Image (cartoon, rainbow, N blue to C red):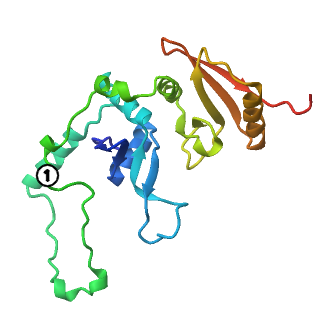
Amino acid sequence: MAEIPIWVEKFSDAFLVWNLEEVKSLRENYRIVGSFVGCLSQCTQQNYQLGLPLMLSSVEVGLLLKNEDEGKDKPDAVVEQSSVTGAESDGDIDATRIVEPDSLPLKNLIVPIANRNPFATDEFYDEMSFNDFLPSIDRVRFPVFTDLHNRGYYITSGLKFGCDYLLYPGDPLAFHASHLVHCAKRSKQFRARDLLSWCRLGTQVKKIVLLCSVDDESNVAYTSLKWDHTS
């Protein structure tokens, strides 16, 4: 999929993406999954499947800003927009037949709904660099997220399994999570019952428990844990 600019809007502590094409670009080009938080208009009495907007965590937004500041993964949508504009100016677009509104049944009328403020100009948004965003990033979870992402994994929230992250070898739509990721400072001491409970849970759900420790220089060390119920 062609890369396009990603507009992330910040509301309080939430980072939201409202455009479907931008959501697809995040997933396919950047391996950023996020989580849908919007209600589906046709299925309002459930919360198992949700829709737009897509909410990003602070570590996901931080990774995007970090890559942009380092010159990685910059989209080339400006060139694509220029080519489209040129085609329109040359008159190469086919004319479409105009349909009178009265000739269409009311139920077939499509009312466009804006997914971004149509009156907002570029001055309406504040551009943020990674250094501006750095104070709000978790200094333990962010190095782990960045390192695992650079290794090619897909990463989602591990809230439903009581861990920090779930690790996927591929797109979560096609793969099950392979690891339960717990993040901690290198100096932290764990209680034996916590380690045992994590290992037993990992065995029950058939996932590897990955303990990630971060030192003061943001270096990450990994330890995998496994429950041996035969001993």
Q: Check disc 1 and report its element: helix, strand or loop.
A: helix
Where is the C terminus found, in terms of image quarters?
top right
- Give the image quarter of residue 206: top right
Q: Which residue is depicted at the point 54% across and 13% down?
A: 215
When the figure is inspected, residue 87 is found, relative to residue 224, above or below; the finding is below
Can residue 83 be seen here? The reply is yes
Q: Residue furthest top?
A: 217
Residue beneath the point at 30% across and 31% down: 74
Residue at image point 62% right, 36% down: 163
Image location (x, y in percent) of residue 95: 13, 68
Examine the image and state in which quarter residue 214 appears: top right
Of residues 4 and 165, the one nearer the viewer is 165
Mark 1 lies on residue? 87
From what the image shows, is residue 81 above or below residue 195? below
Q: What percent of the width, then of the height, locates residue 34?
A: 45, 44
Q: In the picture provided, is 217 more to the left or to the right than 98?
A: right
Q: Is residue 132 above or below residue 167?
A: above
Q: Is residue 86 left or right of residue 199?
A: left
Point 40% across, 39% down: residue: 29
Q: Amino acid at mark 1?
A: Ala
In the rendered image, residue 227, in percent from the top left (x then y), is placed at 81, 31
Q: Nearer the viewer, residue 204 or 174?
A: 204
- Within 10 Å of disc 1 (Cα), the crowding (few <14, some 14-19, many 20+) is few
Q: Residue 168: in sight, yes or no? A: no
Quadrant of the image containing the N terminus: top left
Q: Where's residue 59, x and y in %?
A: 43, 32
Nearer-the-camera pick, 161 or 19: 161
Quarter of the figure with residue 209: top right
Q: Is residue 2 left or right of residue 168?
A: left
